[in-house]
Structures are given as structure tokens and as C-alpha cells.
Image: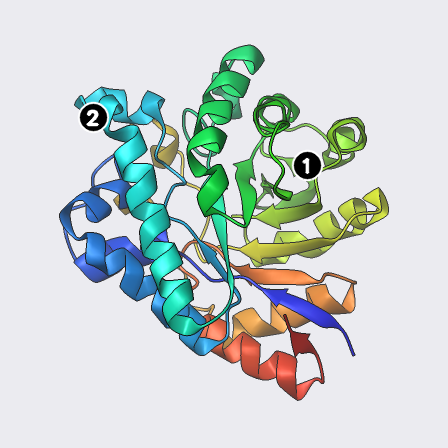
Amino acid sequence: MTDIILLDGSIGQELVRRSADRATPLWSTQVMLDHPEMVGEVHRDYFGVGATIATANTYAVHRSRLVRVGLDDQMPVLVNTALDQARAARDAHGGGRVAGALGPLLASYRPDLKPDVDDAAEKFGELVQIMEDKVDLFLIETVSSVQEAIGALRGTAATTKPVWLALSVEDDDGTRLRSGEALVDIRPVIDGFKPDAVLINCTRPEAVASALEIIKAFGLPFGAYANGFTRISDAFKADAPTVDALEQRTDLGPAAYSKFAMGWIAQGATIVGGCCEVGPDHIAQLARDLRAAGHSIV
């Protein structure tokens, strides 16, 4: 059948859930500060159920986020802690790859903040330099506007490692980025920077199929990893929000999520996994369903 790359599921939300600590604006970075060994445990669990990619807990490790709590000077240390935990889990498993996660520079789901492209490119470039020797690929995540995509892709332009771009679309309209821009408007950026894959992430799974119909025309490997939130609430779009402003769905168990993902594969996707609130049980079910359908997990 088809070779499928099976991503892991939620890293940040899974860490917050396991820690049972009070949510803070630092999100999973705070958990890593308090419980660094827990990061490795999460990666090991995903490898154990069939994932072939460990997404490092670097999504929110940005100077622009850390400066709010006086930790911006700790950014390189935190990045390396996340990468070392992911690499150790990969080595213990005996295979797999590590993806350096590059989340939004200022905040998730906030295209209205419009980060300056030159500044974004410089800051992403710094992260790439720190991560370059410890990752197998870079995963730019939850890109909500054309402007965000340009800044991040410029920042990763000098790397010799593959770069995957993951775009976030409206929860109720997969044809539009969260900025309101038409998803197809990202095409000139894709053609110009030529990332190695284009994905849809951190939106409701119901919105993914229509998004895939658009990005499959870009002529690159494509895929998706959706979230398990009811929706992105207005409360979470405030400054320095905490994840308790978001609500987990109760109707998206492993079987239900896997059914969505198998549908994406039927559309031609070759990279699938899960985002926030999609945990190891979901990835385990997806791995079983992939094998049952005759696909190879690579």
C-alpha cells in the first residue's frame, strides 16, 4: 500500500495533563522546568505505540515568551533540554527521528499580532542554529497567516535539514487560514521557499479534509495532525493565556480520531499524527489501523 510517516501526538498538552500542575502562560515549558524527565517519558510512550517522529518540546521556547518571566537568557538551555530528552528517547527506542518544533513567535492562533517578518526571520534563525546539529528535521507549527509563514520560512532558509510547514486553518472552514486569508494564498510562499512538506495542524479534524484538497495541489508531500479541542476560545486569544481557557472534546476518542486520519490518507496524505489533546492511545489506535489497512509505518 503506502509508506506513512506517523507523527507523535500532543506533547505540550500531554505534559500539562501528566504533571497535574496549575497551568501557566509558559505552558509545557514550565512543566519541562519542573519535571524535565517527564518530557522523555512522553516521547518514549509515543515511540512505544508506533510513532516514528519525536516532536521536541521546543514549540513555545521563544525569547519573546520567556522574557515575560525573566527567563529569556535560559532559552538555549531549555532548547537543549528538550532536544536531549527527545534524542534519548529515540536512542532508547532504537530508531526514529527528532523534529525541532518551531511554534509561533508571539502567540498561537494570533495572526492579528503580525510579527515583523525581518524580526521573525532573525529569531527563528537563532533557534535553527541552536538546534541544527541535534534534529533530523524542522517542523514549523500552527502557522496562522501568510506573514507568519514568510517569517518562519526565511528563518529556516539556511538549514541543511528538511523543513516541514504546518498551517492552522479555521475550525469551521478548512479553506481559510486563521487570519481569514484563503489557504490557497499561501501557494506563492510555498513555491518560493520550497519546504519539504506541507501539513495542516491544530484545528478541528472536521476542517482538515477541505484543507488537504487545497494543499495537495502544491505538489509536495502533505498530511495533517488535528487537535482535540472543542474550538479555540476567545479567552485563549487574550495576552499570555493559559490552557485552562480551552476545552477538551469528549467525542474524539482513539477510534473516532483514527477514522478521520485514515480519511486523510485516502486523500493522499502520507504524514499523519495528532496535536493538542490527541494522546498515546490515539496514536496507538492509528498505528493499528494503518497496519490493518496494509500501510507501512516509516
Question: Relative to residue 177, is residue 188 drawn left or right?
Answer: right
Q: Secondary structure at mark 2?
A: loop
Q: Compare marks 1 and 2 and give the one earlier in the sequence.
A: 2
> Which is nearer the eye, 291 or 208?
291
Residue that carries the numbered disc 2 in the rendered image:
71
* Relative image position of residue 5 (x, y in whole percent): 63, 64
State the residue in front, 111 or 58: 58
Quadrant of image for the C terminus: bottom right
Can you say whether 154 is above or below 14 in the image? above
Q: Looking at the rendering, which quadrant does residue 266 occupy?
A: bottom right
Q: Amino acid at mark 1?
A: Arg
**Crowd tier of the residue under label 1, counting other residues whose Cα lies within 10 Å: few below 14, some 14–19, many 20 or above:** many
For the point 45% across and 77% down, the residue is 49
Is 39 displayed left or right of 164 in the figure?
left
Question: Which residue sits at x=53%, y=39%?
Answer: 142
| CA neighbours of label 2 inside 10 A, class few (<14), some (14 to 19), many (20+) | some
- Front position in the image: 160 or 293: 160
